[in-house]
Image: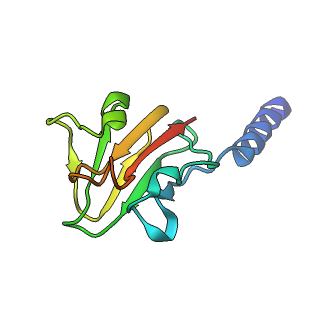
Amino acid sequence: MAQQRLWVALLVILLLKSKPTESNHYVVGDNEGWTYGVSSWPKGKVFYHNNVLVCMYEAVFNYQAGFHNVVRVNRHEYETCQPNPNSKTYDSGHDELRLKRGMNYFICSVPGHCHDGGMNISINAL
């Protein structure tokens, strides 16, 4: 019985020392939001994907609805600023997109906003 209590106590301590279990949101562009020139925003930040101990890590895109949008794209679409026509476009002005493990790519597909305006980000989620 004492050994079981010791194992339970050890498990509780390990869980308390682990990453938090609540949702964690990264607001893209911080106070400026999802706007022109945001492509350097992820530099120096550490991002995590959703896993057992971390329920969800999301990138929150705040912007003026009707003026910008957000599209999750692959690397080629990110580099060319040309999303697949079948890609889901988010346009609410407040979009919360869950990060997947590995590289996550997002662009604004409004003509000129990605290529000329720098509205494209890549996030590596650990």
Q: Is residue 123 above or below residue 64?
A: above
Q: Quadrant of the C terminus?
A: top right
Which of the pair 52/27 is nearer the observer? 27
Residue 58 at what x, y percent from top left?
Answer: 45, 50
Q: Which colour scheme appears in the figure?
A: rainbow
Residue 21 at what x, y percent from top left?
Answer: 57, 49
Residue 55 at what x, y percent from top left?
Answer: 49, 45
Question: Which residue lies at the image location 83% right of the left edge and 36% below the top edge?
Answer: 6
Q: Quadrant of the N terminus?
A: top right
Q: Is residue 50 above or below residue 62?
A: above
Question: Which residue lies at the image location 65% right of the left edge and 46% below the top edge?
Answer: 19
Q: Is residue 99 above or below residue 38?
A: above
Which of the pair 119/46 is nearer the observer? 119
The tally of labels here is: 0
Residue sitting farthest toward the front: 116
Which of the pair 105/38 is nearer the observer? 38
Question: Which residue lies at the image location 21% right of the left edge and 53% below the top edge?
Answer: 110
Residue 121 at what x, y percent from top left?
Answer: 43, 46
Q: Quadrant of residue 91?
A: bottom left
Which of the pair 11/93 is nearer the observer? 93
Q: Is residue 94 above or below residue 81?
A: below
Question: Which residue lies at the image location 56% right of the left edge and 41% below the top edge?
Answer: 48
Residue 45 relative to residue 82: left or right = right
Q: Quadrant of residue 18?
A: top right
Residue sitting farthest toward the left: 85
Q: Quadrant of residue 69?
A: bottom left
